[in-house]
């Protein structure tokens, strides 16, 4: 029973390990995980909440204001008439009053409307800036992920080379027994095997380091993860760009226009409603010396008469700020167009390299097969064969590197065009 229990335990462990080793992740999944746990993603939600608060605050200008006020006072003198009037008592020097004031804005020149539109633009820009930060995170994920793919491709090629060397070793050992070759030929192959093993060890160390970085960015344990080649969407090789920076520039320019309108709204007549009611002495009948109720309602309006100098100054400042932003936008657009064109040229260059890589590999594989046969026949030395084998290996590695570089360049082009 103990043996059965122990055997079952090891079977479970092996199953778990196998399941861990078979875990695969895509580049899109890594990006989603990294974005989900980034502070920028959290800040986007907080900015949406902040916008609601700011819009409510801007609209509060239209909310009615209601105040309770009171007063107790004593005055040294009261108005005196030159002659006494029957029924009119001397006014009291002590006064008491408690009341309520209501004020309601009816028209404010568009101040609330422009304030809300400005807040929306400002918040939209903050969201765009956070999206730029998120794009930076995506670019980090892409760089790490593609480097991991390069390492896997290199390791697979080296594993194939190692198997080939083992086959050659077995055949040379048979020839050594027959006295056809010397032992130093086998030693040379053993040295080459050690070199390949050393390269694989370095690749493994680099892979573990990259996996650790990817785990930190994604918040997932990717120790046992395997990575697959991504299927990138078709990338249009043109200079059309939808970068978020252009939207930010446009929003900033529109925001300046709303700031101008906000200032102009202070020069437009404003209308409001007021109402006051209370109880005290004296009432609005100044000659009534008794306590009583009082109230009044009415409309108020304000008409600015002279504010031209300040208005012209604000307008000039905003015009200069708009000119600066337009110049900055133009410079950014030119730089972006140059970077896009350079990346398109890079993509075309790598595509041409891949065409030549295929031809070079075919030639090297033919030569290596010939050298392998000649080695067993004693026509070439082990050194010649190993040199040829290394040339073929390097050509295979170059092809895989160029493939990953092409993927990386396409992702970078998407980022430059604002389509990442």
Image (cartoon, rainbow, N blue to C red):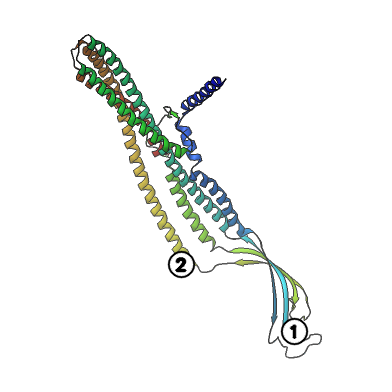
Residue annotated with mark 1: 92
Q: Is residue 133 above or below residue 6?
A: below
Q: Is residue 39 above or below residue 16?
A: below
**Which residue sits at x=47%, y=49%?**
251
Q: Is residue 54 above or below residue 268?
A: above
In front: label 2 or label 1: 1
From the viewer's perspective, is 393 left or right of 76?
Answer: left
Q: Is residue 332 in view?
A: yes
Q: Quadrant of the N terminus?
A: top right
| x and y, in percent, of residue 121 in the image | 51, 50
Crowding near pointer 1: few (<14 within 10 Å), some, many (20+)? Answer: some
Q: CA distance from mark 2 to mark 1?
A: 50 Å
From the viewer's perspective, is 59 left or right of 412?
Answer: right
Which of the 4 quarters of the picture holds residue 300?
Answer: bottom right
Q: Earlier in the sequence, mark 2 or mark 1?
A: 1
Instruction: Give the residue furthest to the top.
Output: 178
Could you say which disc has been placed on residue 309 in the image? 2
**Which residue sits at x=34%, y=40%?**
339
Which of the 4 quarters of the picture holds residue 412?
Answer: top left
From the viewer's perspective, is 114 left or right of 75?
Answer: left
Q: Is residue 237 in view?
A: no
């Amino acid at each position: 029973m103990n043996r059965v229990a122990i055997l079952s335990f090891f079977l479970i462990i092996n199953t778990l390990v196998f399941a861990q080793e078979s875990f695969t992740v895509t580049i899109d999944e890594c990006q989603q995980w990294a974005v989900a746990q980034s502070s920028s993603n959290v800040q986007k939600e907080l900015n949406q909440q902040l916008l609601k608060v700011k819009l409510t605050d801007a609209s509060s200008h239209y909310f009615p204001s209601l105040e309770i006020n009171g007063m107790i006072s004593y005055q040294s003198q009261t108005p005196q008439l030159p002659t006494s009037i029957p029924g009119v008592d001397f006014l009291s020097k002590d006064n008491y009053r408690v009341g309520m004031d209501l004020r309601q804005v009816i028209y404010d020149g568009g101040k609330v409307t422009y304030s809300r539109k400005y807040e929306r633009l400002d918040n939209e820009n903050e969201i765009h800036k956070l999206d730029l930060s998120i794009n930076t995170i995506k670019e980090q994920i892409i760089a790490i992920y593609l480097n991991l793919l390069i390492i896997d491709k290199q390791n697979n090629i080296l594993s194939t080379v190692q198997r080939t060397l083992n086959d050659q070793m077995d055949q040379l050992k048979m020839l050594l027994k027959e006295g056809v070759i010397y032992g130093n030929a086998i030693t040379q192959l053993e040295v080459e095997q050690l070199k390949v093993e050393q390269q694989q060890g370095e690749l493994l160390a680099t892979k573990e380091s990259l996996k650790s970085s990817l785990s930190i960015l994604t918040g997932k344990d990717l120790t046992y993860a395997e990575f697959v080649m991504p299927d990138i969407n078709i990338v249009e090789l043109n200079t059309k760009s939808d970068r978020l920076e252009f939207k930010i520039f446009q929003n900033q320019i529109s925001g300046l226009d709303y700031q101008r309108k906000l200032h102009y709204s202070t020069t437009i007549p404003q209308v409001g409603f007021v109402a006051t009611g209370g109880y005290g002495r004296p009432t609005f009948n100044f000659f009534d010396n008794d306590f009583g109720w009082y109230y009044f309602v009415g409309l108020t309006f304000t008409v600015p008469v002279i504010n031209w100098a300040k208005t012209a100054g604000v307008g000039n400042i905003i015009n200069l700020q708009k000119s600066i932003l337009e110049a900055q936008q133009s410079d950014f657009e030119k730089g972006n167009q140059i970077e896009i064109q350079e990346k398109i040229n890079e993509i075309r260059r790598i595509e041409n390299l891949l065409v030549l890589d295929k031809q070079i590999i075919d030639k090297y594989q033919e030569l290596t097969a010939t050298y392998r046969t000649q080695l067993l026949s004693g026509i070439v030395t082990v050194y010649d064969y190993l040199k040829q084998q290394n040339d073929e290996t390097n050509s295979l590695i170059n092809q895989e590197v160029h493939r990953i570089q092409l993927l990386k360049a396409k992702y970078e082009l998407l980022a430059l065009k604002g389509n990442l």
